[in-house]
Image (tube, grey):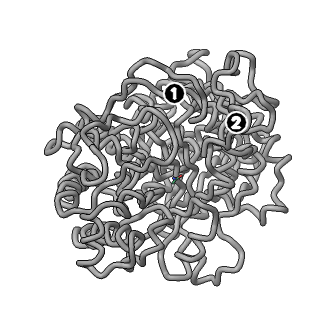
Amino acid sequence: MTSGNEIIPAPRAVEGPTRCGVLLDDSTVLWAAPGTGSTERWLRATLGAALGLPLPPGPAEARGGVRLLLDDTLEPESYRLSVIADRGVEIRGGDPAGVFWGAQTLRQLLGPEAFRRAPVRPGTRYGVPHQIIEDGPRFPWRGLLLDVARHFMPKEGVLRYLDLMAAHKLNVLHLHLTDDQGWRVEIERHPRLTEVGSWRSRTKFGHRASPLWDERPHGGFYTQDDIREIVAYAAERHITVVPEIDVPGHSQAAIAAYPELGNTDVVDTRSLSVWDTWGINPNVLAPTDNTLRFYEDVFEEILALFPSEFVHVGGDECPKEQWRDSPTAQARIRELGLAGEDGLQAWFVGHFDTWLAARGRRLIGWDEILEGGLADGAAVSSWRGYAGGIAAARAGHDVVMCPEQHVYLDHRQDGGAEEPVPIGYVRTLEDVYRFEPVPPGLTPEEAAHVLGAQANVWTEAMEDPARVDYQVFPRLAAFAEVAWSRLPAPERRDFAGFERRMVAHYERLDALGVGYRPPGGPKPWQKRPGVLGRPIEGTPPMR
Ligand code: ACM
């Protein structure tokens, strides 16, 4: 039997457990109060499949049953899970999400078999020790970014990641839908974005300085119905999907589809194709009215698909050379009285800031967007360390902390030459566990602008789901604990205790079929054969 002391992310308080417990079997009934329907459906579907517990509806007072209810004395997303002799299992949530997170804890208490898709021991009775767990999140934004642009993740993979996020009480999926190497969302008014922009003919293998190519075409995109399905699947799990359309840099796939979006007075944009290698691309959007109208069309369709309050507009890594050389861009700078090319970038992002605000949404972008001043409601994803986040919080903007030094999960997990995806710098499981989203030096008022934290998964070197799993796990478990639990200051965190608790969690991940990096390093089959993917001597890391 699993106790609350082995839950990941760690709950706030556990009373008990005792050696006795409540037994759940195929006669156990489920009573769900109004407002708890998503958890009722999830418990029946998940525990029904995994353990053969059908959880038929039954009265609230049934002995030994499962009860779900709302309790307005609890905070949003918080829950109280009680396992008490005779009374059974009760989950009270401060809101429907709180009940759902409580159900995630119940699943962990039922043992690793609860993470399978069919019973391996049909007819078993499953014990849950008597205990009371009080729990709730530290941050309202507990995010994971999936870069589905560099390597496409088919819809099925995204749905699976939503389930993995739910199991770790993460609640924001940031979908990086567009980049130089691919456009991944159907836009009805501009069909070439996916007809042309979603496929590339070949792909650089490994580091951008590598001489190796994968000569197979790579691509794919989500139809609007796929997106509706992803968003609804996420919502049922109390996860918000934040879409990212990256402008004005990272846009070569869009320019390959519609060459007039690029700086046609500087380069022959008709000769551009979807980019097949990595790095920072000089082919950025032209700062013209035509480009603004085009992207307004795109964002209109994005708003119709994604109910998220926040819409991410990228804004990172936009080289200014083409604007410097473009008479059109220079004329725009003069006409608007802007401070050079940096002012042009600020004007471009500012346009969509105002445009989104007028539609009741809030812009969020990478920390480069701070450089030109922002509308009041805009928020910042702080990725180049903490500095952008600190400056944003001090200026009264909300911040999501995702510094590459801690939570870029594309970065290698060990300093040896054995990692199959050997890019970036070394970010160990312990580095992630000791990540502190609120930097020292902020006043309490400024710190309140830190909405939370996000782990970012850039997929240049992750061409299939197995590589994604390897990079994401087990580090996402450590990240979840940072974002959910109230851990002490980084240097006082009990990493050895976390590793001990991970023993039970690896069994859950095994039952889920997650291809995590095993403790101690990659297994032979996880290593890259030969030189493929290894950094080329003397070149900088990928990022
Ligand atoms: C980023 O990593 N360019 C946001």
Q: Please provide percent x and percent y for residue 73.
A: 51, 70
Question: Which residue is at the front of the view, 194 or 484?
Answer: 194
Q: Residues within 10 Å of mark 2 (few under 14, many from 20)?
A: many
- Estimate the spatial distance between the alpha carbons at disc 2 and disc 1, rounded to whole Å: 26 Å
Q: Please provide percent x and percent y for residue 312.
A: 38, 58
Q: Is residue 343 left or right of residue 66?
A: left
Q: Are marks 2 and 1 in contact (CB under 8 Å)?
A: no
As drawn, the label of residue 192 is none
Residue 63 seen in render: no
Say which quadrant the N terminus sits in.
top right
Counting every numbered tag in the picture gives 2
At mark 1, the secondary structure is loop
The residue that label 1 is drawn on is 463
Q: Residues within 10 Å of mark 1 (few under 14, many from 20)?
A: some
Identified by mark 2, the residue type is His
420 over 237 or under it: above or below: above
Quarter-of-image position of residue 95? bottom left
Q: Please provide percent x and percent y for residue 370.
A: 47, 72
Q: Is residue 477 left or right of residue 158?
A: right
At a point 27% along the width and 64% down the height, the residue shown is: 327
As drawn, the label of residue 505 is 2
